[in-house]
Image (cartoon, rainbow, N blue to C red):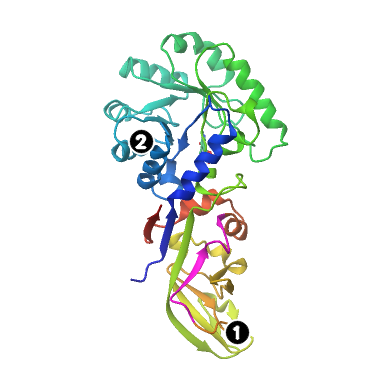
Amino acid sequence: MSTGRLTIDLDALAANWRALDAVSAPTVETAAVVKANGYGLGIGPVARKLAAQGVRRFFVAVAEEGQMLRRALGDGVEINVFSGHMPGDTEILRQLNLVPMINSIDQMLVHAETLPGHPFGVQLDTGMNRLGMEPGEWAALRDIALDLGPTLLMSHLACADDPDHPMNRHQLQTFREMTDGLDVPRSLSATGGILLGPEFHFEVTRPGIGLYGALPFEEAQPVAYLDLPVIQTREIAAGETVGYGNSWTAPHPATIATLSGGYADGIHRIMGPKTAFFAGEIPCPVRGRISMDLIGVDVTHLEDIPDTLTLLGHQQGVDQLADNAGTIGYEILTSLGNRFTRRQIG
Ligand SMILES: *Cc1c(COP(=O)(O)O)cnc(C)c1O
């Protein structure tokens, strides 16, 4: 077997959910966001573990994800869909009993006409300018929407990973102006918002990334571990080069291990120069360009060459790798490829 091994620590995932749940008052419902295949870690195992912790409400980006989730979890949990009620969604929403977060007057009309009596929430735009009704639209539609009995009023913070950003308070205030006194459960905060404090919690919180062990939840336990097998090892002389474009020239005789894995597995080329693999505690730098399926790593200084080297582990986490690639943990996790052998522990 030459594929990398991605290990998903479901106990750590569960501990992260409990820790985020404990940040808010016991009356606040902590839901879970499992879009993009559970942030790349596998929607089925992730959602089943969270349901076993007591999660009763899940959020996905699109109806098709809700369909997969319903099949994984069965009835008895609420599945909310951020993209709302899109053309072509009606049958899926109905058959699988998914709750669309209605984003516009158009969606509201389609929903009321095609699925009368079917539960829905409303997404409000408090300044991010991405999804949801703006204050003007909401003012026009509010009384009609409230008559139809929405199950949730939600909005999303644009800058919650930066606690001092004035946008946080601005959006909080706008959300309150749009929803105070309406007697419908409200939700404003994802992981970052939960950490901003109780004013941001309302009745339902929606953590995603913190569950999967990445920033802005600094205390998160790591959830994903990745090891790649060594396919071949070779001795090279000083002056020889490694990989496409001859981008690395050995300054001295070196031992290079060729690992199975590459950018097609989400190990982005750009992280190469700053990234090491680990043999236990010993870093082994990437040499030459990361290719689609293979990566050269310097193991000159190792006494024994192990069968596998670690990319994600206690030595180097998702956020470090994200830094190396100039991106965020979300993108590292959701890029993890489907060639890996996936194994859940816990
Ligand atoms: C992705 C998403 C979340 C979860 O955000 P995290 O930062 O991963 O916790 C919550 N709400 C909405 C609308 C989202 O798009």
Residue 179 lies in quadrant:
top right
Q: Does the residue labelled 1 lie within 8 Å of ligand 1?
A: no
Mark linked to residue 201 = none
* Residue 140 belongs to magenta span: no
**Above or below — where is 294 with respect to 122?**
below
Query: As shown in the figure, which amino acid type bears the numbered disc 2?
Result: Gly
Give coordinates of residue 138: x percent, y percent: 53, 16
Find the magenta span and give its range: 305-318
In the rendered view, would you say 137 is above or below 95? above
Badge number at residue 66: 2
Kind of element beneath mark 1: loop
Left or right: residue 24 versus residue 147 is: right
Residue drawn at point x = 58 percent, y = 31 percent: 24
Q: Residue visible at 46% across and 47% down?
A: 39
Q: How crowded is mark 1: few (under 14 residues within 10 Å), some or many (20 or more)?
A: some
- Closer to the chain start, of discs 2 and 1, is 2
Distance CA(mark 2)–CA(mark 1): 51 Å
Q: In which quarter of the image is the N terminus?
A: bottom left
The tag on residue 250 is 1
Q: Nearer the viewer, residue 324 or 86?
A: 324
Q: How crowded is mark 2: few (under 14 residues within 10 Å), some or many (20 or more)?
A: many
Q: Where is residue 41 in the image (x, y as percent from the top left)?
A: 42, 51
Name the residue: 68% across, 31% down. Answer: 167
At label 1, the amino acid type is Ala
Q: Position of residue 222 (x, y in %)?
A: 53, 53
- Quadrant of the rendered image containing residue 339: bottom left
